[in-house]
Image (tube, rainbow, N blue to C red):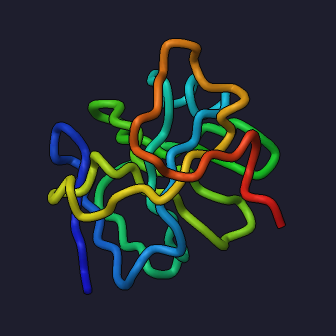
Amino acid sequence: MIREGGCLCGAVRFKVEGEPINVRICHCRNCQKAMGSPFFARAAFDQRALTIEGETARFPTSERIDRVFCTRCGTRLFSWRRDGSVAGVALAAFDDRHAFAPTEHIWVSEKMGWVKFDDALPQYPEGIPS
């Protein structure tokens, strides 16, 4: 299966092939700051499954992760692991914004106090336990 998406202005388009590794909502402080939102809802894919057209820029938000965005409109599209393994694709950036549904919440220890859950999804104080 191939799914497509892009930024607000259309200057960046992407295609992703196959099914995601996982679909999560991250409430960590880095995601909050990077997305300008209470959380980052994303589908994780092997970076080799992702094709990107258009000009993007990266900003390092940790030792392991770069955030990737459109240089024209600033839409935040991906979290990109520097080791070349995984890219987190923003769920709302897909053309079909209903293509994937999250299966869990991570880093709920850092969620904003007014965020309430009524989706019955598993919640983890930090990342998924090993």
Considering depth in this image, is 68 or 105 the residue closer to the camera? 105
Residue 111 to residue 104: above or below: above
Which of the image's four quarters has the N terminus?
bottom left
Provide residue 109's location: percent of width, then percent of height: 72, 30
Residue at the spot x=69%, y=36% of the render? Answer: 61
Considering depth in this image, is 57 or 32 the residue closer to the camera? 32
Residue at the spot x=45%, y=61% of the render? Answer: 43
Considering depth in this image, is 58 or 87 the residue closer to the camera? 87
Which of the image's four quarters has the C terminus?
bottom right
Relative to 13, 46 lies left or right: right
Provide residue 129's location: percent of width, then percent of height: 80, 60
Residue at the spot x=60%, y=37% of the render? Answer: 59
Based on the displayed image, in which of its 4 quarters is residue 50 positioned?
bottom left
Residue 92 to residue 111: above or below: below
Residue at the spot x=59%, y=34% of the render? Answer: 27
Residue 108 to residue 84: above or below: above
Total marks shown come to 0
Based on the displayed image, in which of its 4 quarters is residue 9 positioned?
top left
Considering depth in this image, is 22 or 125 the residue closer to the camera? 125
Residue 95 to residue 77: above or below: below
